[in-house]
Structure formats: C-alpha cells, structure tokens
Image: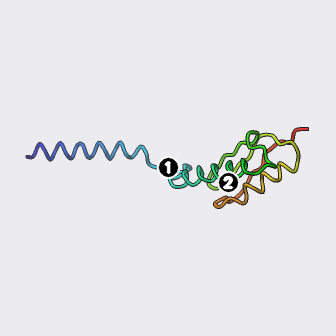
Amino acid sequence: MFIRHTIAAAITAAALLAASGCAVTRGQESTGAYMSDAGITTTVKAKFVENKAVDASSISVETLNGTVMLSGFAKNATEKSTAESVARSVNGVKAVKNDIIVRP
C-alpha cells in the first residue's frame, strides 16, 4: 500500500513538472489572448475578402495583444486606407499598424 502511494505521488510530481513547461512567462501571451488575437486576425481577413475595395490576397494580417499589423501591397492609397479602416472596425482591435506599401 505504501509503495502504491509513493508511485502515485511520483507520477503526480512528474506530471506537474511536465505541465509547468506550458506556463506563460513574462512577455508571452496567455492562451486566451492568443485565441483572441487569432480570432481578430481571422475576422479582419474575412472582412477583407468581403470588401471589394481591398485585395485580400495582397495584404497580410497579424495580431499581437489586440494590435493588428498590416503589411503587403495596395494598388493605391484608397485601398491602403480602406484596409486600415476595415481592420479598425473589428471588435477587440486596440490599434492598427499599417505598413502596407502602395505600388505605383
């Protein structure tokens, strides 16, 4: 009986040590924040596809802690500003960094 409890305690300790490898450290996002950022990215991309003024295939979207980063190429300044406006309209977006380059 004592051996059974010792083995159970050892297994529990090993599981706790292994699980601590998944802990969030300073500077990393929590799982909830990551899911929220992934949802924001997906929503922005979907709105780009719906909007005929934005070429969704030419613009990349990344989100980190609610800040959306746009990069890629636009045909004109109107497309660039429309993409930024669309990104700002998505729930959960705290800021938009627009690094889209207008191709001549």
Residue at image point 71% right, 42% down: 60
Q: Earlier in the sequence, mark 1 or mark 2?
A: 1
Q: Secondary structure at mark 2?
A: strand
Q: How many marks?
A: 2
Question: Marks 1 and 2: which is nearer the front?
Answer: 2
Residue that lies at the very extreme toward the left in this rendered image: 1
Residue at numbered disc 2:
67
- Specify the color scheme: rainbow
Instruction: Return the mark for residue 97.
Output: none
What percent of the width, then of the height, locates residue 14? 29, 42
What percent of the width, then of the height, locates residue 49? 72, 47
Residue at image point 49% right, 49% down: 25
Three-letter residue code for mark 1: Thr
Q: Secondary structure at mark 1?
A: loop
Residue at image point 72% right, 60% down: 89
Residue 10, image quadrant: top left
Q: Image check: 47 left or right of 79?
A: left
Q: Residues within 10 Å of mark 1 (few under 14, many from 20)?
A: few
Which residue is more in the foreground, 91 or 22? 91
What is the C-alpha distance between the residues marked 1 and 2?
A: 20 Å
Three-letter residue code for mark 2: Thr
Residue at numbered disc 1:
25
